[in-house]
Image (tube, rainbow, N blue to C red):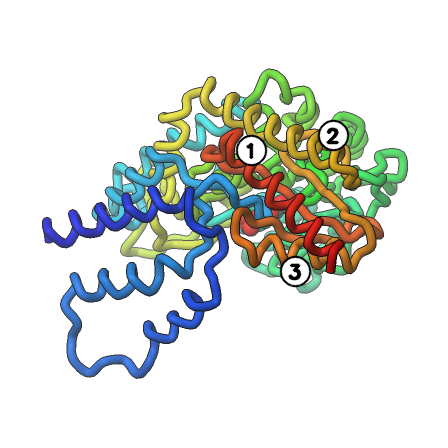
Amino acid sequence: MHELLTDAANRAARYVREAGSRRVAPGPASLAALDQLGGPLPELPTPAPEVLELVDRVGSPATVAASGGRYYGFVNGGILPASLAAGCLATAWNQNAALHVMSPVGAALEQIALEWVSDVLGLPAGCGGAVLTGATMANLSGLAAARHALLHRAGWDVERQGLFGAPPLTVVVGDEVHVSLLKALGLLGLGRDRVTRVPADDQGRMRAGALPVLDDRTIVCVQAGNVNTGAFDPAREIIERAREAGAWMHVDGAFGLWAAASPRYRHLTEGFEQADSWATDAHKWPNAGYDCGVALVRDAAHLHAAMTATAAYFTPGGLREPSQFTPEMSRRARGIELWAALRSLGRRGLADLVERTCGHAQTFARRLREHGYAIVNEVVINQVLVSFGPPDVTTAVIRRLQDEGTCWCGGTEWQGHTAMRISVSSWATTDEDVELSIAAIVRAVDECRRG
Ligand SMILES: Cc1ncc(COP(=O)(O)O)c(C=O)c1O
């Protein structure tokens, strides 16, 4: 076992060392080699060192180098050294974090990490929550708490009776709502298409003036950080209306909410702290590694009521039981990497991470503008949308850039523009990475224009 784990640690260390210098997306040969992992399930056992050797030899080259500094795809974070190392240990621990008795350390780290997240995001003292797989499940959990609270107030027990015959709820979202929030609404029986959509401005911000009449059976979903532009909904104006009406305000702050950790960017998140529930990701901006999302609820009793389930053989004691706040029962103790990320960064490190990545985004925008390309969004945090002219040229540049391998950016359609998305979300991105990436983008544009 010792030799095997040392071998694994050495392979992981080599992988991370090379992630910064290899091509970001795997090449065709590496992808084709994945066939070697398949075939019929062998009849006889394979020794563990051979399994490790095979998965490293064939699997590692077929990864996307997301732990390097030049992956700007989606809004994917890297992984901090402390989280990576703690995650290795956590795998050895193999804790089931469903109940306190199953993993006292898992429960403790999760609880501490939740308090730190709530504090650093400037959320109300005393709110509670859960560590989950990502913002999709965090949205689902926050909205499940909202559904419980509003229907309980109306005299309906939704967990027991379901939604059949329940007093109707209204869900209000901005026109640029993230698709994961709609998915969560669908899972909760609230309907992806049954929402009232509020028009958004050219940055994707909900127009507060266009809000419909709200009441105490309404859930208003606002966004801190649009996935394309990084823009923030006008939370202060919306929360005033929601409060007056007795509506529930839920925040999808998958990455943008972390701007609150920085004195320079905190103003963007003002008003969001007055909401009733929040969803965010720790695998995005805080670089805690995949997968890690966080749901927080002002009155965690609503989340507890939505998620709790007991059986004779696992009657909870007096302590906080993690699975009483989560959709899952058995689950990985994923609070460990979150705790390690926050502990290693500290307040200052987290602020620095946010400010550094926003600074890189500004550099991308400035330099690409200087090259004559159109920056399509207001670069408020770490997101840059760039267009290289006609849609087919932009699409061709994106493809060429991805094939060339220096860096990786995806594409999007933003309010009538075909654009390339640059999301600077990794702690590992350096000034040199930005320069190399800009040079690669310029090369790709020149090559495409030459045909
Ligand atoms: C605003 C927003 N909400 C939700 C999500 C979904 O997050 P996850 O993929 O971690 O579930 C994302 C992902 O980019 C996002 O940007």
Relative depth, front residue between 166 and 253 = 253
Which one is earlier in the sequence, the residue at label 1 or at label 2?
2
Few, some or many C-alpha atoms within 10 Å of disc 3 (few <14, some 14-19, many ≥20)?
some
Mark 3–mark 2 distance (CA, rounded to whole Å): 24 Å
Q: Is residue 139 visible?
A: no
Few, some or many C-alpha atoms within 10 Å of disc 2 (few <14, some 14-19, many ≥20)?
many
Mark 1–mark 3 distance (CA, rounded to whole Å): 24 Å
Q: Quadrant of the C terminus?
A: bottom right
Q: Secondary structure at mark 2?
A: helix
Q: Give the residue drawn at x 74%, y 49%.
A: 419
Q: Amino acid at mark 2?
A: Ala
Relative depth, front residue between 37 and 89 = 37
Looking at the rendered structure, which numbered label has been put on residue 235?
2
Picture quarter containing residue 343? top left
- The reply to whether discs 1 and 3 touch (Cβ–Cβ < 8 Å) is no
Q: Is residue 30 left or right of residue 363?
A: left
Question: How far across and how far down the image is residue 39, in percent?
Answer: 32, 81
Q: Secondary structure at mark 1?
A: loop
Q: Give the residue drawn at x 89%, y 34%.
A: 209
Work out whether 196 lies above or below 225.
below
The residue furthest left is: 2
Q: Is residue 63 visible?
A: yes
Q: Nearer the viewer, mark 1 or mark 3?
A: 3
Residue under label 1, please give it.
299
Residue under label 3, please give it.
186
Q: Nearer the viewer, mark 3 or mark 2?
A: 2
Q: Amino acid at mark 1?
A: Asp
